[in-house]
Amino acid sequence: MQLQRTLGWKEATSLGIGAMVGAGIFVLSGVATSKAGPAVIISFILASLLSILLGLCYAELASRYPKAGGSYEYVRETMGNFIGTVIGWAYWGAWLAASSFVSQGFGHYLNVLTGAHPKLSAVLLLISLGFLNIVGIKFSGKLQVGIVGTVIAVLIWYFLLGLKNVDLSFYQPFSPNGFSGILEATLVGFLSIVGWDAIVASGEEIRNPKKTIPLAIITSIMVVLFLYLGLLFISIGVIPWQEFGASEVPVALASQQFLGKFGPVFISLVIVLALPATCNAFIITISRTAFAMGRNGLFPKRIAYIHPRFQTPIWAITLGVSIQISFTLISSINIAVTATGFLYLLTFIFTMIALFISRSKATTKDREAQFYVPLYPVIPILAFAICLGLLIPVGKSGFLTGFLWIFFGIGVYLIRLRTIKTTKKANLTTHTCDS
């Protein structure tokens, strides 16, 4: 039940960029702007700083525990199976909920472009990417590199073309909703940028994880921050922030101001190209987390089965895509965002605790062989405190939805525990009788 290390720095970085660039820029940029106004730029800078702090912490854990599963594996290794299962379930749920607003965003933009049914388009996308991932992550990784490179080039072109059309009067007042609005938008921005942890969730398939993972995390966050700030600066500078924040297709609406009727068509084409890269990264992360939980007994062992030819966890991919489709069909974007926020923050908080426990057990030999967070313990304490602060704007719906998902996960854990004990007892009885 071991995955092969086939991903290098380029593929790992593209995985992180692809997970962030689609959802945040094209789907959630309007949601964040509606909360903070033009000050959304500050929100995204704060969100990026937090992501860098967390990314450094995750890089240390990933170099120490270079396995699939990300946060689930780190918490399980340091705090035991039960807490690890709860956090793994929360981590899995966060990605599942996030994938629903990404696939819905794809459907909405494709509808603008072609008139295709949004939900049907989203489902067909998930099925196609699921099949692609079953065939093999190496091919999927190369496709990811190509898509991400194209999207980066187009967004730089968008920035350069729109720069001369910016009207700075649209930035007044700069912070219409005060600090509370900036904080709420920071949570949304944080959700837009946390896709970098797709890199650590695939740690078992990355070559030379000690060097590749931290470098890929930092590179992907910095590239995406540059793209976010450029797009937001142009978009808010060509259209009132209220209109941008209220639109379901905000980037397409902004592009119309300086590209005319061609703008929405062109941006929709770019987004229809970009969002599959995001969905692909989500499928990889969701399936690897399910694979790790199956390998450790939370899910049936079949979920951890690796196809001998494709070398991919085919049943973990199938399970993840099936649930993603269900979430896409029944959830709204706002509910998905708040649920993702709570589950993600809970995951990050416990992962920081896992880092402290792990560091206390590290030996001198470990220190020489692994990546270590600089300025310890300042960076993890700061990241921990900011995550706690971001729980405030999650709201009742986020807490309620998140806790319901966790309670459901605890139920699954107890059922699996009982099943495993019953099976062991039956096997022991059979062995005794045979003897």
Image (cartoon, grey):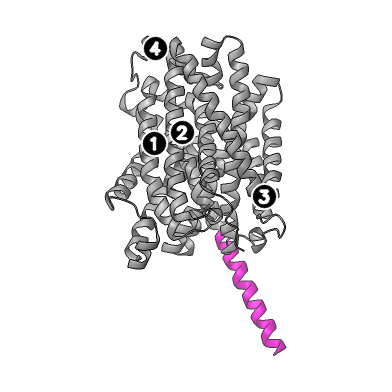
Tell me the SS state at disc 1.
helix
Q: Amino acid at mark 1?
A: Ser
Marks 2 and 1 close (CB-CB < 8 Å): yes
Location of mark 4 (residue): 170
Q: Position of residue 242 (x, y in %)?
A: 45, 16
Q: Residues within 10 Å of mark 1 (few under 14, many from 20)?
A: many
First in sequence, mark 3 or 1: give its number.
Answer: 1
Q: Nearer the viewer, residue 24 or 347?
A: 24
Residue 312, compared with residue 221, is above or below; it is below
Q: Which residue is depicted at the point 66% across and 77% down?
A: 426
Q: Which residue is depicted at the point 53% across and 19% down?
A: 247
Q: Is residue 39 left or right of residue 338?
A: left
Location of mark 1 (residue): 48
Q: Position of residue 366 (x, y in %)?
A: 37, 64
Q: Quadrant of residue 183?
A: top left
Q: Residues within 10 Å of mark 3 (few under 14, many from 20)?
A: some
Q: Which residues are magenta?
A: 413-435
Which mark is in front, 1 or 4? Answer: 1
First in sequence, mark 4 or 2: give its number.
Answer: 4
